[in-house]
Amino acid sequence: MQYAIRSAFLILTLVLAASACSADASESESLQHARRLLRETILIDGHNDLPWVIRTHEAARGDVKRYDISSRVPGQTDLERLRQGGVGAQFWSVYTPSEAPGGFARTQLEQIDIARRMIERYPEALQLATSAADVRDAHRNGRIASMLGVEGGHAIENSLGALRAYYDLGVRYMTLTHNSHTDWADSAAQAPKHDGLTEFGEKVVLEMNRLGMLVDLSHTSDATAAHAMRISKAPVIFSHSSARALCDVPRNVPDHLLRQLADNGGVVMATFVAGFVDPEVSRIQMPAIEEAKRRAEGKSAEERSRIYAEIMDGVQIPTVSLSKVADHIEHIREAAGVEHIGIGADYDGNDLWPEKLSDVSGYPYLFAELIRRGWSDRELQMLAGENVLRVMAQAEDVARKMRNE
């Protein structure tokens, strides 16, 4: 009897060990699959705030040589980790605060200058891209296609001439608002003022269409986003937003706008920010984060980290599973369609992330999770970058037609 019990126990132990090994092998296989896929396709991330980190870092103060991304840096982005993450193209956010001392346009031009100098400093790794064809060319050359995105329409100072000048300097999307209203569009972060776009706001959207600059609706109010999609002649993007049905924060996109986005032909680029992904984190964290953001506005990276640490001390934040991000991506697929999903992590713009997604090296883990959920290679390629490349190409076609007319 004892022999039978020992034999049964041994068999059970072997079965459990075999199951564990099988699970580990499966995870390793899916991760290898993800890394292989990201070598062969173009992963485009819609939003990274590295230029602002370079500007505010205590030792760099805007000097791209001092914030040397060819080595390990304090932030979440450098060349080695970009390579580990399989990043093929990046929209670098040239962010300007809505309280910029010295004027919005001056700060905006300085931010564009920082981003362009950063790209020029690493020609073996980065290549400036201003079109879908440029992105594919950079990928063929083994470089990360580098595009510029203005975050906040206040940067044009109510001037279509400024908008055109930014386009000439390489900007290929503009987020219509940031966390405050402009004179012509409502932000998601404040009580409604215009109930969407003003007449001038409509002119801004149409001029962006004429130029071939993508209309970015992250940070905008629902009314502004709906209005912009209604009048835009080209597909729009949400460069770093997720699904409001899964995490009810104003920065995320509700289902009725996801359905409207499908009609528009645009793309939602899902963010990884913990407070926009997990409702429990949002409930606990967001009041503290908003206070930290308010106090950290315009501060250096070190000062910002100190302020965040001071405010968040004692706040118990649960660990966020990477699967939560995958849930948002799958919800967007269900609501809008697989043709309307992308990735916009928002690295170097936040400090709290899901497990395995704490910096730009983490993308393969997310793709491995989707592979385990049964996503095909073609669907993953669309998510990674093909959807965004389609939107870029369509916006360029619209611009050519509008200029001819």
Image: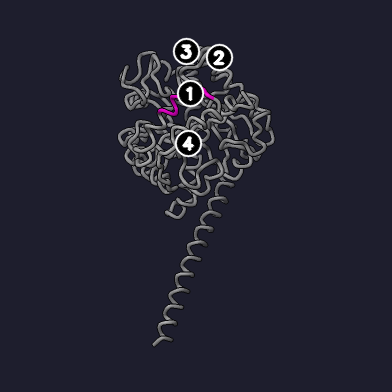
Above or below residue 116? Residue 17 is below
Q: Which secondary structure lies at badge 2?
A: helix
* Label located before the other in sequence (3 or 4): 3
Q: Are marks 4 and 1 in contact (CB under 8 Å)?
A: no
Q: What stretch of residues is rendered in magenta?
A: 291-299
Q: CA distance from mark 2 to mark 4?
A: 26 Å
Q: Which residue is mark 3?
A: 157
| Magenta-span inclusion, residue 19 | no
Residue 202 in view, yes or no: no
Residue 247: x and y in percent read: 34, 39
Pinpoint residue 154: horizontal percent, then vertical percent. Answer: 45, 17
Mark positioned earlier in the residue sequence (1 or 3): 3
Residue at (44% x, 32% y) in the render? 311
Tell me which numbered mark, 2 or 3, is placed earlier along the sequence. Answer: 2
Q: CA distance from mark 1 to mark 3?
A: 20 Å
Q: Residue at x 58, y 19 (%)?
A: 110
Q: Earlier in the sequence, mark 4 or mark 1?
A: 1
For disc 4, the marked residue is 344
